[in-house]
């Protein structure tokens, strides 16, 4: 069986001294592809460099909602310039996080919409982060469901069954992480 790791943060400093070993173990365990999304302006170049070093690693570019203060229009231009890079496979990790950041909801929504438009213009999937924001996330995505070609992964999904089917019916796959082990899940 072959595996795909659709959400590795190989640019995390914990991997700085052993990334070769991590990639080697992944290959030994039949991981054929690893997608490494950025989460800040600072991580963009690092995830790209890692993808260039390892054949099985690809990258996604975006700004995590907890790091949106690092977003500038330069980020959008950088992503557009990479449109022909065969290692760029998605826009992400982007989205809404109302768990930690409740003061800047409108800013998060505006930047998330910019990333959606960018994904659509480049015909790339989107990797969505959503925490404590499922209702608002769905309201935003719903405006793109009819007629657009928006698709991707709702990473770390924590919504209910009804929302899950709506999202799946509109071209997304769901990712489940440690949050499914929480008592209220």
Image (cartoon, rainbow, N blue to C red):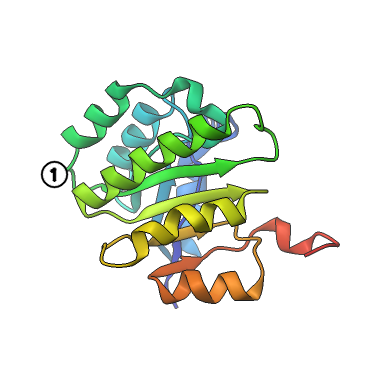
Residue 95: x, y in percent? Answer: 49, 44
For the point 28% across and 48% down, which residue is it?
119
Q: Is residue 155 positioned above or below 10 on the image?
A: below
Q: Residue at x 48, y 39 (%)?
A: 109
Classify 122 as above or below 50: below
Do we see residue 38 in this rendering? no
Percent of width and height locating residue 94: 46, 42
Query: Camera-side residue: 49 or 43?
Result: 43
Q: Determine which quarter of the picture holds residue 79.
A: top left
In this rendering, the answer to whether 174 lies above or below 129 is below
Q: Find disc 1 in the rendering and name its residue.
A: 84
Q: Is 125 left or right of 132, judged from the image as shown?
A: left
| Quadrant where the image shows the C terminus | bottom right
Point 32% across, 60% down: residue: 150
Q: Specify the quadrant that holds the N terminus.
A: bottom left
Count the marks: 1
Q: Report whether 109 appears left or right of 164.
A: left
Rendering coords of residue 175 (x, y %): 55, 63
Q: Residue furthest right?
A: 183
Residue at the outermost left position: 84
Q: Left or right: where does residue 112 sit relative to residue 106?
A: left
Q: Is residue 113 visible?
A: yes
Residue drawn where x is 13% and y is 44% of the image: 84
* SS for dot 1: loop
Residue 76 pos. (x, y %) = 28, 31
Please rate how many residues cluster around mark 1, counting C-alpha atoms within 10 Å: few if below 14, some from 14 to 19, many from 20. few
The one nearer the camera, 148 or 46, is: 148
């Amino acid at each position: 069986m072959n595996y795909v790791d659709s959400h590795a943060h190989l640019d995390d400093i914990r991997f700085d001294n052993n990334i070769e070993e991590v990639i080697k173990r992944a290959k030994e365990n039949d991981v054929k592809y690893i997608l490494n999304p950025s989460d800040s302006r600072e991580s963009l170049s690092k995830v790209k460099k890692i993808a260039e070093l390892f054949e099985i690693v690809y990258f996604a570019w975006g700004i995590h909602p907890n790091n949106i203060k690092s977003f500038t229009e330069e980020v959008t231009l950088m992503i557009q310039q990479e449109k022909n890079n065969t290692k760029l496979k998605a826009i992400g990790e982007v989205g809404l996080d109302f768990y930690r950041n409740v003061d800047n909801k409108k800013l998060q929504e505006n930047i998330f919409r910019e990333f959606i438009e960018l994904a659509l213009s480049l015909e790339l999937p989107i990797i969505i982060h959503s925490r404590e924001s499922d209702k608002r996330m769905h309201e935003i995505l719903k405006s793109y469901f009819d007629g657009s070609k928006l698709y991707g992964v709702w990473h770390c999904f924590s919504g209910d069954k009804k929302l899950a089917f709506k999202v799946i019916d509109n071209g997304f796959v769901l990712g489940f992480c440690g949050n499914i082990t929480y008592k209220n899940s």
